[in-house]
Image: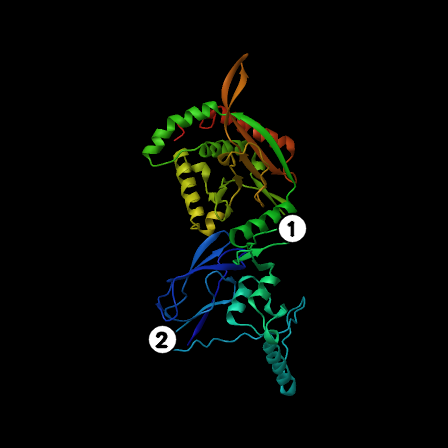
């Protein structure tokens, strides 16, 4: 018997996904747990496996389309069987705070009249399949478009006009598709995938967190020398050693002295984390993604460097597991790699703090009455003022900077690797 496989909830808070790539086609035989399709959800691309063995009788969504949790992905059955799943009925909303009431189906003249009205409405919308596809692509409700073609037929130009896109003919006679508003030419792109998720998270953080940002400078000359010494050993291990693993180690050391920094607010309780899961923001072509290094306090410099590199690569290739994105207690976002000195990062809610290292520069500074050229790291912290006072944030940063300026303190005399 044909089985309708619906898009499952693949993670906490997931409501929809975008079809990235089908790995099967109608008529293919599949085994249980065989990957059927790649779907992009909440910053990750996940494989959806088949719930059972059988033959693919029907595929309900095309690549690039959005599917909601609970909608039918595919129909699976026996070879030669018809894909006749249960047809969903459109039922008027009859919900209340208590529950839902079922409406009795319409019978007799009422039902016939409703069917007649629906058929008549369908007839009024006259458009070719190509025009309907264009309307769907541009997210235009074709029922709301007034057709200018023969007998009211809707044309491609009608759809383009409704979306703010028209064809303008130049003096050369070449028609060029242009999108514009009243001020000039524009491009439109859908808010979806990672960008949509980032947008929602940033809005939630902005509406919830009370952010304050403090700005500092750290002299990382000695840290830079230590890194240069250990780069060769790192290369032998196939590891690219940046400043970030050292910053993570210094952060963990400072968090140990200031546990309130490693916290979140849930209702009327402050949750102080006794673990150190450090989120590291990664710039990808699809948007900002922050995978989490779990148990960072239990890993040495080389292990941190290697894991950061692996997570960053997976983030750019959209191969992160959903669990790679969850469980963070403190985050770091580094804009120094793109030339930024100071900035005001947004807290990765529900965390309470985020650290923002900037670009390291050589600067002439006074040292023991003399001018010396030192490597200076601009570094900022944004914190949720509902939980953390400015004085406590300052004490945390003073300790953090002390560790960065005296790297031997980070490791308590032990080797960094």
Q: Nearer the viewer, mark 2 or mark 1?
A: 1
Q: Which residue appears farthest toward the front when viewing the image? A: 171
* Above or below for 414 versus 159: above
Q: Position of residue 93 (x, y in %)?
A: 64, 71
Q: Is residue 182 left or right of residue 290?
A: right
Mark 2–mark 1 contact, CB under 8 Å?
no
Q: Is residue 76 left or right of residue 16?
A: left
Q: Position of residue 149 (x, y in %)?
A: 59, 72
* Above or below for 172 versus 128: above
- Identify the residue position indicated by label 2 in the image: 79
Q: Which residue appears farthest toward the left when viewing the image? A: 236
Q: What is the CA distance from the residue labelled 2 to the residue labelled 1?
A: 58 Å
Q: Residue at x 55, y 72 (%)?
A: 127
Foreground: 181 or 26? 181
Q: Position of residue 375 (x, y in %)?
A: 49, 24
Residue 369 figure quarter? top right
Q: Residue at x 49, y 31 (%)?
A: 250
The kind of secondary structure element at disc 2 is loop
Q: Position of residue 49 (x, y in %)?
A: 41, 62
Dot 1 crowding, Cα within 10 Å, few <14, some 14–19, many 20+: few
- Identify the residue position indicated by label 1 in the image: 183
- Identify the mark nearer the N-term, 2 or 1: 2
Placement of the N terminus among the 4 image quadrants: bottom left
- Tell me, yes or no, if residue 368 can be seen here: no
Dot 2 crowding, Cα within 10 Å, few <14, some 14–19, many 20+: few
- Tell me, yes or no, if residue 216 can be seen here: yes
Kindly identify which numbered label has been placed on residue 101: none
Q: Is residue 281 left or right of residue 150?
A: left
């Amino acid at each position: 018997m044909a089985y309708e496989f619906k898009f499952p909830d693949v993670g906490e808070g997931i409501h929809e996904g975008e079809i990235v790539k089908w790995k099967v086609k109608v008529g293919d035989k599949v085994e249980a747990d065989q990957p059927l399709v790649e779907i992009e959800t909440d910053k990750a691309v996940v494989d959806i496996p088949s719930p059972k063995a059988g033959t693919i009788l029907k595929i309900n969504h095309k690549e690039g389309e959005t599917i909601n949790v609970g909608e039918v992905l595919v129909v699976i059955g026996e070879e030669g069987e018809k894909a006749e799943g249960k047809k969903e009925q459109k039922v008027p909303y009859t919900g209340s705070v208590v529950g839902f009431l079922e409406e009795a189906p319409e019978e007799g003249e009422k039902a016939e009249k409703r069917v007649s009205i629906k058929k008549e409405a369908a007839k009024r919308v006259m458009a070719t399949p190509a025009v309907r596809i264009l309307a769907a692509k541009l997210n235009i409700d074709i029922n709301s478009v007034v057709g200018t073609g023969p007998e009211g037929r809707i044309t491609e130009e009608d759809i383009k006009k409704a979306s703010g896109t028209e064809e303008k003919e130049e003096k050369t006679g070449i028609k060029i598709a242009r999108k514009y508003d009243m001020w000039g030419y524009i491009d439109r792109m859908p808010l979806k995938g990672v960008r949509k998720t980032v947008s929602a998270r940033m809005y939630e953080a902005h509406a919830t967190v009370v952010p304050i940002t403090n700005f500092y400078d750290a002299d990382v000359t000695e840290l830079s020398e230590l890194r240069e010494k250990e780069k060769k050993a790192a290369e032998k291990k196939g590891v690219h050693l940046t400043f970030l693993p050292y910053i993570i180690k210094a952060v963990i050391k400072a968090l140990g002295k200031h546990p309130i920094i490693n916290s979140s607010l849930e209702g009327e309780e402050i949750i102080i984390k006794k673990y150190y899961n450090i989120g590291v923001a990664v710039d990808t072509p699809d948007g900002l993604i922050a995978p989490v290094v779990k148990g960072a306090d239990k890993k040495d410099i080389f292990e941190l460097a290697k894991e950061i590199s692996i997570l960053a690569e997976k983030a750019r290739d959209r191969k992160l597991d959903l669990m790679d994105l969850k469980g963070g207690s403190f985050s770091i976002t580094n804009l120094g790699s793109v030339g930024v000195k100071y900035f005001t990062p947004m807290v990765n809610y529900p965390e309470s703090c985020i650290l923002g290292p900037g670009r390291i520069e050589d600067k002439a500074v006074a040292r023991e009455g003399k001018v010396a050229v030192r490597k200076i790291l601009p570094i900022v912290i944004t914190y949720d003022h509902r939980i953390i006072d400015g004085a406590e944030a300052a004490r945390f940063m003073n300790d953090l900077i002390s560790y960065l300026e005296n790297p031997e303190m980070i490791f308590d005399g032990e080797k960094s690797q």
